[in-house]
Amino acid sequence: MSEQKPKTELEKKARQWLKDRGVTLEDIGELVYYLQSPYHETLEMDVCIKNVDKVLGKREVQNAVITGIQLDVLAEQKKLASPLQETIETDESLYGVDEIIALSIVNVYGSIGFTNYGYIDKQKPGILKKLNDKSTGMCHTFLDDIVGAIAASASSRLAHSEANDEELD
């Protein structure tokens, strides 16, 4: 059994900020299950969560998490200059930078990550539906895409491990 490496300050912060914004590993694990259960008859939630945990161990993912959440928080606090403030606040459909940050996450796990992300972003199951709800008073312009990308990446990691392309450890 491999020894778990200690988490960096960046990783601890990314995980804490997700939690502070109401997103748990279990929430993301449910999205992985949603994506992968049709292909794996015996898939268990702990496997999904383990893959989410591994994805969150990547520095690129941690950087995307803290960047996106910080922009969402600044938009909530109305601390961004116009027109960026209004663009992020309303999650303008043609903005696209939120999706670019998400794509930087899925890029870590190859082309299957892109298709998983596109599908889950369109469907918005589970926590994504909640994060996309504009009536909460919270801004999740970046967070919903980041969470979807983490789930898509964990799903891709799971698919690769099932094909023996990557160790699950």
Image (tube, rainbow, N blue to C red):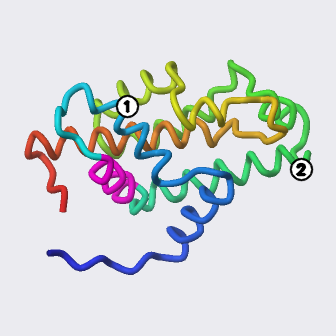
Residue at 77 percent across and 40 percent down: it is 139
Sequence-wise first label, 2 or 1: 1
Q: CA distance from mark 2 to mark 1?
A: 34 Å
Question: Above or below — where is 18 with respect to 45?
Answer: below
* Residue under pointer 2: 77
Residue 38 among those drawn in magenta? no
Q: Quadrant of residue 82?
A: top right
Amino acid carrying label 2: it is: Gln
Q: Position of residue 67 (x, y in %)?
A: 64, 53
Q: Which residue is mark 1?
A: 34
Quarter-wise, where is residue 128 in the image? top right
Location of residue 25 in the rendering, given as x and y in whole percent from the top left corner: 47, 54
Q: Is residue 83 left or right of residue 69?
A: right
Identify the residue at horizontal 33%, vertical 78% (top origin). Answer: 5
Q: Residues in magenta?
A: 45-55
Q: Quadrant of the C terminus?
A: bottom left
Question: In front here: 100 or 24?
Answer: 24
| SS for dot 2 | loop
Pointer 1 local density, CA inside 10 Å: few below 14, some 14–19, many at least 20: some
What amino acid is at disc 1? Tyr
User: Residue 136: x, y in percent?
Assistant: 80, 37
